[in-house]
Image (tube, rainbow, N blue to C red):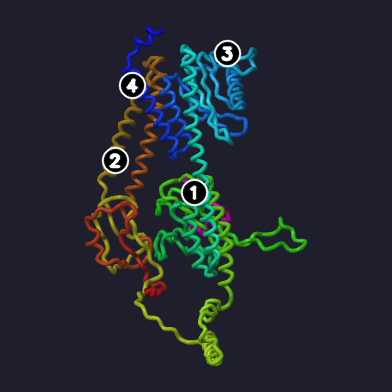
């Protein structure tokens, strides 16, 4: 024994110790890192296996009291547990026994109590099992598959190392719990602030602005938009992070259109890339908006006001929900995933937003409420000495309003107009080509069906000639084969082959005839005629079209019938 110890290189021992210390330091850093458990399991187990130079290992997590689930594994297949059902049962009972006892164990290979259904180690490896636990909770087990050909003292060292590493893993879970408690405290603080601010105003615009900005902070998404329902349409009232926005922009217009479609359907819509289960009008609105905004996740949720209290003898099942007052729109620009935590926060924001916005709109809908609100803020008007003047001015204003509504008056508008015939048609090119002849000029009278323009398409002509040549060649082959078929000197064994060739050639002939007919129909479209009787109203049509290449569907000119009715088109400015 002493001779073997003297033969070991001291430098190698020191290097091994340094590597183990390095692995331990890395595991300690992992325990302090803010990473997901799945990532921690993999990084942790790899370093434990490397430090022990073991064959493999596994991390078992406690999903429910008394139930273990495999969280991560390395070389589990080398234990052959997956191939032997009985071995899996005995191994599972062993893990359950360790979990129940709460003590780490060393289990030699093929050891345990007799019987197939008893806890034992059915593998060829030494099992080192440690518990990841705190004073109150057990988070899981760490199992290492080690080679059994080591001294008992060495095996005890393995066990002490695994127990120490399990303590680091327990520190990770304790830190994670503390972070969750901190996040929960921040969430409750934000929720309290959101609840307080969203119900602090009875102005619909201010309420919508608060919902959008405070709701985005609570949900932790990229953008929150509030749309208010006015009649059958929804208008975007507030966008998070923007005090002012262009209500005429294409994005805002499409967002209002999307909110209108979803509110009309009455269903919550969560878009993460798929639109197959949506109604056609909702699907079209989503596609238009996503193409414009490039959002990866869009949730549109109708905001229903709270249900009033039930009256006596009223059946709650027959009660119809009140119509929505608007919609809450939540967006993610880069990520289309929707965690359960986000859904829960969205539901909370939606519940408070529905009540706050419904109260604000109900209050604002009272008769002349904006006027009364402004008058109520001005104390000068309601003082005792000024009250008669205020009443007199108010009565005069009401009288003027009534007169304006009752007495008719002219309202003159000025704009540039253009007299246009009612019957007019645009002439389009039905095929591609180059204009070679223009038979009309501006102002010419034309009849229905009269030739206006002739096009030339060399490619079409070349294709027609090629098909004609192929058709003639096929017809010659058919004639030759028919002569051979009816020739009495043709052997009987060749007649069957000739008949088969004739069938193929006749099919080819039919296809070529159909193709030639299609080309002829296309060639007819090179001659463009007038769709109606009328007059050419396109200016300088010959200079514009002559020798110009045109595409299918391109507008060539306009024909109008001046003998029919006319109407006046007036362009009015919007301001």
Structural crowding at the residue carrying mark 2, measured as other residues with C-alpha within 10 Å and reported as few (<14), some (14–19) or many (≥20): some
N-terminal label among 2 and 4: 4
Of badges 2 and 4, nearer the viewer stands 4
Of badges 1 and 3, nearer the viewer stands 3
N-terminal label among 2 and 3: 3
Of badges 4 and 3, nearer the viewer stands 4
In the foreground, 481 or 65: 65
143 left or right of 3? Answer: right
Q: Residue at x 57, y 25 (%)?
A: 103
Check residue 525 in the rendering and tell me which mark sits there, or answer none: none
What is the secondary structure assignment of the residue under circle 4?
A: helix
Q: Which residue is mark 4?
A: 15
Q: Which residue is mark 3?
A: 111
Q: Which residue is mark 2?
A: 463
What is the secondary structure assignment of the residue under circle 1?
A: strand
Depicted 140 relative to depicted 120: above or below: below
Residues at marks 2 and 1, CA–CA distance in whole angstroms: 49 Å
Find residue 474 and report its horizontal and vertical position in percent: 33, 31
Find residue 3 and report its horizontal and vertical position in percent: 37, 7
Is residue 457 found inside the magenta-colored segment of the image?
no
What is the secondary structure assignment of the residue under circle 3?
A: strand
Structural crowding at the residue carrying mark 3, measured as other residues with C-alpha within 10 Å and reported as few (<14), some (14–19) or many (≥20): some
Read off the magenta span.
258-274
Quarter of the view holding residue 449: bottom left
Q: Which residue is mark 1?
A: 271
Quarter of the view holding residue 252: bottom left
In the foreground, 496 or 488: 496
């Amino acid at each position: 024994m002493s001779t073997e110890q003297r033969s070991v290189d001291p430098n190698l021992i020191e290097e091994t110790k340094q590597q183990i210390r390095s692995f331990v330091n890395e595991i300690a850093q992992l325990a302090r890192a803010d990473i997901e458990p799945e990532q921690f399991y993999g990084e942790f187990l790899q370093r434990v296996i490397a430090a022990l130079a073991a064959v493999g290992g596994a991390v078992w997590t406690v999903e429910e009291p008394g139930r273990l689930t495999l969280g991560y594994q390395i070389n589990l297949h080398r234990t052959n547990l997956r191939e032997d059902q009985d071995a899996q049962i005995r191994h599972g009972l062993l893990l359950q026994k360790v979990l129940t006892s709460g003590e780490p164990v060393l289990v030699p290979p093929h050891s345990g109590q007799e019987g197939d259904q008893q806890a034992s180690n059915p593998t060829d490896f030494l099992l080192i099992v440690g518990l990841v636990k705190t004073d109150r909770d057990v988070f899981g087990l760490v199992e290492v598959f080690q080679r059994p050909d080591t001294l008992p003292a060495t095996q005890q060292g393995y066990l002490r190392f695994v127990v120490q590493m399990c303590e680091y893993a327990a520190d990770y879970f304790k830190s994670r719990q503390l972070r969750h408690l901190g996040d929960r405290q921040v969430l409750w603080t934000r929720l309290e602030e959101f609840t307080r601010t969203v119900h602090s105003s009875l102005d619909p615009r201010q309420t919508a602005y608060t919902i959008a900005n405070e709701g985005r902070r609570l949900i932790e998404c990229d953008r929150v938009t509030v749309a208010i329902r006015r009649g059958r349409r929804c208008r975007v009232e507030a966008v998070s992070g923007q005090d002012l926005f262009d209500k005429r922009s294409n994005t805002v217009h499409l967002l209002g259109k999307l909110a209108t479609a979803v509110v009309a359907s009455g269903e919550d819509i969560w878009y993460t890339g798929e639109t197959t289960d949506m109604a056609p009008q909702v699907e079209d609105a989503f596609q238009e908006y996503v193409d414009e905004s490039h959002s990866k996740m869009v949730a549109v949720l109708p905001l229903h006001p709270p249900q009033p209290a039930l009256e006596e003898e009223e059946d709650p099942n027959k009660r119809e929900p009140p119509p929505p007052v608007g919609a809450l729109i939540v967006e993610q620009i880069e990520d289309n995933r929707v965690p359960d935590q986000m859904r829960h926060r969205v539901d909370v924001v939606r519940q408070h937003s529905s009540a706050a916005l419904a109260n604000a709109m109900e209050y604002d809908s009272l008769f002349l409420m904006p006027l009364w609100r402004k008058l109520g803020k001005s104390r000068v008007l309601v003082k005792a000495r000024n009250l008669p003047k205020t009443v007199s001015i108010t009565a005069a204003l009401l009288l003027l309003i009534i007169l304006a509504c009752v007495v008719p008056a002219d309202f003159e508008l000025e704009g540039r107009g253009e007299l246009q015939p009612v019957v007019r048609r645009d002439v389009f090119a039905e095929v591609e080509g180059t204009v070679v002849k223009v038979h009309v000029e501006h102002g010419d009278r034309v009849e229905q069906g009269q030739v206006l323009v002739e096009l030339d398409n060399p490619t079409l002509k070349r294709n027609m000639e090629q098909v004609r040549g192929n058709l003639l060649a096929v017809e010659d082959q058919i004639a030759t084969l028919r002569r051979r078929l009816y020739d009495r000197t043709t052997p009987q064994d060749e007649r069957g082959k000739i008949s088969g060739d004739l069938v193929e050639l006749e099919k080819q002939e039919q296809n070529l005839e159909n193709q030639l007919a299609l080309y002829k129909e296309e060639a007819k479209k090179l001659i463009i005629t007038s769709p109606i009787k009328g007059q050419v109203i396109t200016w300088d049509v010959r200079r514009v079209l002559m020798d110009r290449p045109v595409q299918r569907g391109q507008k060539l000119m306009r024909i109008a019938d001046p003998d029919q009715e006319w109407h006046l088109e007036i362009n009015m400015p919007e301001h």
